[in-house]
Image (cartoon, rainbow, N blue to C red):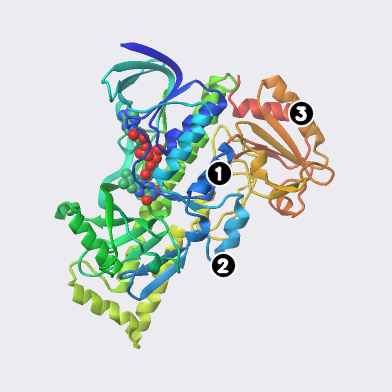
Amino acid sequence: MSTIETDVLVVGAGPAGLTMAALLARHGVNAITINKYPGTAHSPRAHITNQRTVEVFRDLGIEDAVRAAAVPNELMGNNVWATSFADEEIARLLTWGSGPERHGDYESASPSQMCNIPQHILEPVLLQGALDQGADIRFNTELVAIEQDGGVTATVRGREDGVEQTIRAKYVVGADGGRSVVADQLGFTFRGEAGLGAAANIWLEADLTAYTAHRPGTLYWMCQPGNDYWVGSGTWICVKPWTEWVLLFMYDPAQGEPDLSDEAVIARAHQTIGDPDVDITIKATSLWQINHLVANDYRRGRAFLVGDAAHRHPPANGLGTNTSIQDSFNLAWKLAHVLQGKAGDQLLDSYHEERQPVGVQVVDRAMQSVADMLPISNALGFAPGQTRDEGLAALAELKADSPLGAERRQQLADAVELQNYQFNAHGVELDQRYTSGAIADDGTEWPTPQRDPELYHHPTTHPGARLPHAWLARGDQLVSTLDLAGHDGFTLLTGVGGDAWAEAAEKLAAELDLPVSAYLVGPGHEHLDVLGDWRARREIADNGALLVRPDHHVAWRSERMADDPQQTLRSVLSTLLART
Ligand code: FDA
């Protein structure tokens, strides 16, 4: 059996693995990424792509390509509940920051907009981005065995020729999804439960322009009584406006598997459209499970888990691919710095310290959001075991001019309001905050959130937070503070009177052989805070400083100029990079 040597073996080329491959390649790390299938995802799967993820794409230089392939933000907003597309609409929520009350929150929080990009369309863009960086990605190559022995030894098999090879690597990244071989064979353990429910995805073509173009959205919830498990008969997910969809429905496996024949799924589709004349073409069907699992450790020795390999949860809040991509954004620079001798191995422990709590938060949030859909069914008067007629009679009470009718209308309004925790959870989407050895805490309290921290983003420069976005004028352009950060290096941000910080950063970059860029923001400098947003968000004086990590998170800050900026920065960088 032949042996190949590399520094990092990435197992899996889904959203997490492709992001890892692209970032490692850009860092110049010697890495091989393998995928057991012949190509990228062949069906839509995940689709909601939040601002934080688009910021990662922006950093990678593929934001425009993603946006060009995606359903744009302005066609994402209407979340509709009805018994069918043709029936009277029951309720609507403006989602993902599209409503007038939330639009400004989303607009001011990030240079990037959310989009709806199904996974089979996103992955080729990510793959091309990774190949453009020079990534070595091998399809049709399956990991069959792996062990740790001071390094990592993997046995991989070519799926076309059956030939086995050994790959020797210094580190392995398990980006191999919900049935991770890396997690299984290297002894990772999980908390939570699997198989909490089951769902079917029907990918189909159906021209629903007449029913959707006037209320463009991503999700249309068709709730019919008396016939179905959980929330209703079918959620329609927009793949291509307004002719391509995924029809998703839950089922109870204890009652047997659903009939996925063309005839049965077309009947279900027609029933939830409410119009038998719409032509339907089935493209594919698949079944999946609801899990509520997170790895207890994201690192074991030389192995790391990213993406679904580490956390498995329902699609509510659309956090699947987003969290997976953000895991890789956290880990890639750390691996690169350690492999290139710029940081000690201990830096890699911070991946678990920072991302595992995020995984816990994400799986719990997604599960709670699924449970929180039940009040909608209750408000509609639907209950398990009901006949269709009983359910329709209960639904009719919503229209009654009676105390019960008024109560049910209030119940429905409250149930729809609760959905903001799934569909406008801006704090959940953007405010992942870290505490670890790779963050130099400054001893100050985190600011007290002024609004609900799950629903609202709270910009702060407290060490561990994502660098707040603010538009700055540079010549005739506007650039985001986030554009100054990232791109594989550290960034020092200071202002008027902060020249000594910038000089110190420049000297240390050479002394420590680290990529550190310094920017002065303010009058007389290249970047002007003409809108005043940076001043409002930076939480430091003009001559203070922020040190931002390659993943846009604030590593350290100084409220004002230090006596010896070079020694201060040297000490901070040495500590957080675990340099001895
Ligand atoms: P992902 O599973 O995407 O990729 C894993 C990769 O590893 C694959 O390329 C696979 O081929 C490869 N691999 C596995 N074992 C291997 C081995 N032994 N050797 C080599 N390669 C191996 N999420 C969401 O947020 N919203 C949604 O609507 C949905 N809908 C949905 C529908 C269906 C049918 C599925 C299956 C999943 C979803 N998801 C979802 C979940 C979402 O797809 C998921 O969170 C992300 O794809 C996770 O990305 P990863 O890269 O971590 O794993």
Question: CB of mark 3 within 8 Å of CB of mark 1?
Answer: no
Q: Quadrant of the N terminus?
A: top left
Report the residue at 80% width, 38% height from top: 498
Report the residue at 42% width, 54% height from top: 317
**Would residue 309 be seen by someone viewing this image from the given angle?**
no
Name the residue beneath numbered marker 2: 100
- Crowding at dot 1, Cα within 10 Å, few <14 / some 14-19 / many 20+, comes out as some
The image position of residue 537, as x and y in percent, is 68, 51
The image position of residue 118, as x and y in percent, is 41, 48
Question: CB of residue at label 3: within 8 Å of ligand 1?
Answer: no
Going by the numbered disc 1, the residue's amino acid type is Glu
Name the residue beneath numbered marker 3: 504
Name the residue beneath numbered marker 1: 63
- Crowding at dot 3, Cα within 10 Å, few <14 / some 14-19 / many 20+, comes out as some
Along the line of sight, the residue nearer the viewer: 489 or 278: 278
The image position of residue 50, as x and y in percent, is 50, 50
Q: Quadrant of residue 526?
A: top right
Q: Quadrant of the C terminus?
A: top right
In the image, is 421 to the left or to the right of 506? Answer: left
SS category of the residue bearing label 2: helix
Q: Is residue 545 above or below residue 204?
A: above
Q: Give the CA distance from mark 3 to mark 1.
A: 33 Å
SS category of the residue bearing label 1: helix
Report the residue at 34% width, 83% height from top: 399
Nearest to viewer (mark 3 / mark 1): 1
Q: Quadrant of residue 578?
A: top right
Nearest to viewer (mark 2 / mark 1): 1
In the image, is 193 to the left or to the right of 315? Answer: left
- Crowding at dot 2, Cα within 10 Å, few <14 / some 14-19 / many 20+, comes out as few
The disc, 2 or 1, on the residue closer to the chain's N-terminal end is 1
The image position of residue 75, as x and y in percent, is 48, 60
Nearest to viewer (mark 3 / mark 2): 2
